[in-house]
Structures are given as C-alpha cells and as structure tokens.
Amino acid sequence: MKMRFSVRTRLATWFGSVFFLGTVLLCASVFIGLRSTVIKVVDSELNSRLDGVDNFLTEHVLRLSTARLQQDLSVHVALKPTFLVVQNPAGEVLYCGASVKQSCDPAGANTWPSLAYGDDLRILSATRIIKGAPYKIRVASDLNFQRAILHQFTFWLWLIAPLALVSSVLGGYWISGRALEPVREIIREVHAIGEHSLNMRLRVATTGDDIQLLSETLNGMLERVEGAFRQVRDLTANASHELRTPVSIIRTSAEIALLNARPTVDSHRQALLQICAEAEKNTRLLDHMLMLARTDSGVQTLHFAGVSLAKSVRQASSTCRHLAEAKKIEVLHEERGDTRLWADASHLNRLWLLLLDNAIKYTPPGGKVAIHTFTNSIGAPCCRIADTGIGIAAEDIPLIFGRFFRAENARLAADVGSGLGLEIVKWIATVHEATLSVESVVGVGSAFSVTFPAQRAMPSSDGLHRETYRSAVSAAV
C-alpha cells in the first residue's frame, strides 16, 4: 500500500528542499566569488611587484655591479625577493629567490608561462625591455594563507548545510501548520454541518486571500445544496399532499359504492366517473413530476426539427377546444404569417397546451381566450395567449413559475391545478432559448407571451442537430 503523507508534511518537505537547495547554491556562489576575489587580489599584487622589479632594474642595472644588484634585491622587502627570479639578456640568472629555486634553471626560462601555479604558488612571468635589453622576470606569491581561508570557509559551509536543512524543514513544518490552520478550522466547521443544519455557513475572514475565496466558495456550495435539499423536501411534501386528496376521494367513492345497499347503474357510473377524474388528475400530476425529475437530472430527450409556429399553436388549440366549449369560452385566433422554428415539436406542443389549459381553467364561463401569432419588429417569432380570467396579483407574478406555487385567488378556483405546469412552461421556453413574459391584472385577465430568437438557424445535418440539443440542455441547466 502506498504511503500517504499529510499536506503539512509535504509542504514542509518541499519548503525544506527548496530552502536547502537555495542555501547550497548561495554558499557555492559565495565560495566561487571568494575564490575568484582571492586570485584577483594575488594577481594584482604580483603585477605591482613585477612593476616594482622593472622600476628597480631600470634605475640600478647599469650603475651597479651584479653582486651589488643581487644584494640590493635581496634586502628589498617590498619586492619579496625570496619569490623573485631575474634573468639578464644573456640568459644568465641575475637573481634567484630561495623559495623559487626550481624556477632558476636558465634552460627552462624560455618555457615560462605568463601565469601559472607552482607548488602552492601563483607565478607571474614577463619579459621587460630595460635600457634597451630584454630581461625575464618571474614573481610568485605563496597561496597557503589564501587556501587556509578557503578551506576554513568550506568547513563552515559543510557544517552549516545540515543545520540549514534541519532548520528549514522544522521551519517549513511550523509555517505550513500556521498556514493550514484556517483550512483545519474550515474542516471542523464543515464537519459540524449536517442535513438538519444546512442553514449554517462558514465564517469568512476578510483577508483577501485564497482562504477567504475558499470560504466564500464553500458557502455558495452550501447555499446551493440547501436549495436543492429544500427543493427535494418541498417536492416530497407537496407531492404527498397533492396525491393524498385524489387518492382519498378515489377510496371514498369506491367505499360508498360498495356500501350502497341498493346500488344502481347510475350510482356506480357516478362513482366510476369520479374515480376516473381523480385518477386522471393523479396521472397528470405524476407525468409533470416525472418530466421535472428528468429535466433536473439532465436526461430529458429533445428532438429538434423544423416546426411551423402557427400549425403547432393550432394543434394545441384544437386539443383544448372541448375544454373551452364545456365552459362556453370563446377561443379567438389571429395569425400574421407563418414562421418555422428549430424546435422540439412535442415539447413545443406541451408548452401551448399548458398555457391554454391555464387560460381556460382560470377564465370564468362565457369569457374569451385570444391566441395571436406574429413576427415582431426585429423579426422574432412570437405567440401571445391572453384571457379574460381571474388575473394574477403583481406580487405573485415573479413566483408563479415556482414548483407547486398557486396564487391565493387561484386556490379558490373550482378546478385548481397542481402548480407544476408553469415551471414546465418556463423550462421548455428556456431550452428553446425563448423569452417568456407575463402581463396580468387581477379581475381583468392575463397574457403570456413567448418570443423566440430572431433568425434562428435551422441546421439540417445530424451533427448540427446534436449540437443544438447540447446547447439547449446547457441553457436549461
């Protein structure tokens, strides 16, 4: 099984590794810089001594004898004579210091490099023209002191490196603990939130950092989860309430029919008619709930194709004609041209059926329902369904598309609906990228308008068909 380390341990390890690597690179850079500086100082001192020897010979080489010249060089402390070699133009050794005896061989003078290392020495060689004659001069410098400094510095580097590693890991562990403390606090608060306390929210510190963003993001997620949980809970409660009444009526009707001591054909017929009516309500409610469940899960199937707007509305109106005739409601049609839509025919037909059913249901007997299809000023296809019904209060208009919502005056209607139809209407309009608007005055009537996008493309290939389906689902979600 693969060993897993905590975030704090991984952060401490990374911090320690990066800090240690940075420390090693810094120490290596300092060492290289120090070594380069030491060499530059030594080379500068060698050049100064070389110039000093040049000046000395220029001043004394012709007026002093060889013995006197050697004696004066040997006591010239500034020139460090023990590290000096001088050859005259004849190739003879004019002076040889005690510390560089190996460089005093006249035969090897021609092979002297201009700058070289000897045994713990830094050597500078040059040929200078003095009084018109070439003199070969070699000066050297002892590097033991400089090397001792570098060795001491290296020793301290090796001593500090492990301490830097340990301190960086411990420091990284402490810093990561402090940095992750707000995250642990968030974890503790999230653990305290359960299904019965979804209204709780995390404390948001106004630090302007990622911790604040994380808290705000989790609060947003909790709000959405609470909304979804409340929606499921309300759906369950409302569905149970809506289903209980029809089931109770069905059961009561059946029991009365069975307990009737002198049953007749008419009494049984009335009982069966009532049972069928309530069963139809239950079927309609379950059908609406199933459709909403599919839309919530994103698996509702859509089949887009070219659809005639006027024909679709006429078909729905024809289906609802018997409902209008039963209440003696006059249905008026007005068509201004015909526009083809890129739409799902069955869902579009359901949209008109739901709107017409609501218009007829909440319009008193003898009223009117007007259906108007047209193209507006910007070329967008529109359908407007207006009635002379009970109307909707202004404060209720934003709420009518919610699940199981019914306005107070709608609850008093004889044939009250389930409260799911308008949410389905809104979903169908959304997946067709249509705009849904409502105008209503209590006691005067309501008008629902559906406006489709202007110049909506009508692709013919299956690939474009599937693309339209995906965008429609995306828009609905």
Image: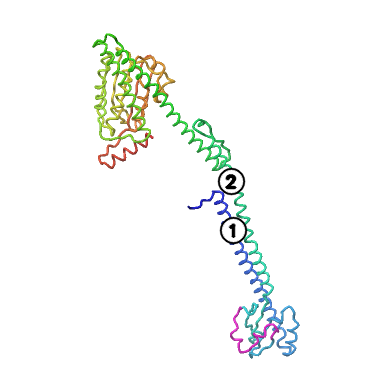
Left/right of residue 257 with respect to residue 207 in the rendered view: left
Task: State the image quarter where residue 207 is shown.
Answer: top right
Q: Which residue is mark 1?
A: 20
301 and 472: which is toward the camera: 301
Q: Is residue 425 visible in this depiction of the protein?
A: no
* Residue at screen point 24% across, 25% down: 315
Residue type marked 2: Ala
Task: Count all numbered tags in the image, as a single digit.
Answer: 2
The percent position of residue 41, horizontal first and vertical second, equals 66, 71
Mark 2, other Cα within 10 Å: few <14 / some 14–19 / many ≥20: few
Is 182 drawn above or below residue 157 in the view shown? above
Question: For numbered disc 1, what is the local secondary structure?
Answer: helix
Left/right of residue 47 with respect to residue 5 in the rendered view: right
Cα distance between the residues tagged 1 and 2:
20 Å
Q: Which residue is mark 2?
A: 179
* Residue at screen point 75% across, 88% down: 68
242 and 258: which is toward the camera: 258
Is 171 drawn above or below residue 437 in the view shown? below
Residue type marked 1: Phe
Q: Which residues are magenta?
A: 96-116
The percent position of residue 365, horizontal first and vertical second, equals 30, 12
Mark toward the start of the polypeptide (1 vs 2): 1
Asked whether residue 393 is drawn in magenta, I would say no
The percent position of residue 185, horizontal first and vertical second, equals 57, 40
- Circles 1 and 2 in contact, beta carbons < 8 Å: no
Question: For numbered disc 2, what is the local secondary structure?
Answer: helix
